[in-house]
Image (tube, helix red, strand yellow):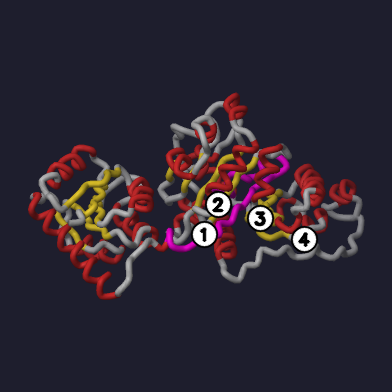
Amino acid sequence: MRRIRVLIVDDIGDTRDSIRRLLQFEDDIEVLGEAGSGSEAILIAEEKHPDIILMDINMPEMDGIRTTELIAQRAPSSSVIIMSVQGEQAYLRRAMMAGAREYIVKPFTGDELASVISKVYEMDQRKRASLGEKFTDSVDSEARDGQIISFFSTKGGVGKTMLATNLAVQLASSGKWRVLIVDLNLQFGDVAVFLNLVPKRTIADLTQSGPIKYSEIQSYLLTHSSSLQVLAAPTRPEYAELVTAEQVGQILNEVKDKFDFIICDNISRFEDISLVSFDVATQIWLVVAMDIPTLKNAKLSLEVIDGLHHTSKVHVVLNRASKEMGMDPRDVEKSLGFKISHEIPSDGRALVAALNRGVPFVTSSPQSKASEAIRKMAAELTSLDMKGSIQAPPKEQGHGNKGPLKGLRRVFGF
């Protein structure tokens, strides 16, 4: 007789131990694992596909309701039973709307718990039999065609990492997509800082662990509360030497069919690792700002990228767009000879406050203009109609030699 495979999810270790002891006397139930957080539960559910997940409703970082919603999308063959000390109908309704199959109030006896588990499992078995098909996780049954988006800028301080992290969080928080962000600024990467995560193991540790396979990569990933997966940069600058361009290429090739979107945050230099990122990327997002040094370097970068035959992948992202800078986006397009794909309005107060708290601004300030722009970017990126093609550069229009663009004309020669 096949045993019912159960995953226990609770942020309190003693509670998990107590539940495990209650179930150890049930011959038809097997505890296949435990998780101390919602994000950990999602990873285990996707990997091990338990029949039943016992889910605590009150957990820090990501509560049981949100975790249940994501598991229903990512591991639909697993049924969730919510556990809580709260027996109010409001909690019951929320749990069921999130996708839970049953609800049990703490404290409970071993017999009560085993009975609920058996009931839910039997209901699932009857449903599968009536449909006449074997259930498998949709995530595993469908071949992924993940997009690799390589973020690049010509200098620090233009907001590349902030845009990369906020876009990644926006995509992941929808619950529809598996999203990974890889910090390739190996000496001074800040992706983990922007997300208020403390990496215990990084990309440098991964490259020293042996053959680079996805089964190994998984154990080096951090999980953000949005369910975003993070491969962090080394914790010290000297550890960057432990990571080679060849290894980065291997990592990206291993993960590209496991995620819907892979965001690479590159160093602001043309070097072997960023070039490997460009090679495997489906899109290269060049982040620019409204100042002459940045635009000068961006124009040079576009020439280099063209020499690498990657121009068709390029999307220009204008960050901190503001009329107060003495120019408008059309002037930036004119100077670069390239169409702007996305504009992020200047919203310094909200963005700096979010950065200092380690909270993405799409979460802390969802009503801000910058957050609205990120949502638009994510919507276009996930649209089925998006072809990824680059629009032709704008036609040159006559400008006089007066006005705020005099300095730009001197640099770019128009």
Which residue position is annotated with label 1? Answer: 144
The earlier-in-sequence mark between 4 and 3 is 3
Q: Which mark is residue 283?
A: 3
* 166 lies left or right of 1: right
Mark sitting on residue 330: 4
The reply to whether callout 1 and callout 2 are in contact (CB within 8 Å) is: yes
Q: Are marks 3 and 1 in contact (CB under 8 Å)?
A: no
Instruction: Please state the horizontal and vertical placement of residue 242, each as a whole percent of the image.
Output: 59, 28
According to the image, label 2 marks what residue? Answer: 256
Q: Amino acid at mark 4?
A: Arg
Q: Earlier in the sequence, mark 2 or mark 3?
A: 2
Which of the two residues, 214 or 397, is positioned nearer the viewer here? 214
* Residues rendered magenta in the picture: 139-165
CA separation in Å, label 1 and label 2: 8 Å
CA distance for labels 4 and 3: 22 Å
Rendered-image quadrant of the N terminus: bottom left
Amino acid type at circle 3 is: Gln
Q: Is residue 144 part of the magenta span, yes or no?
A: yes
The part of the image, by quadrant, that contains residue 315 is bottom right
Q: Earlier in the sequence, mark 1 or mark 2?
A: 1
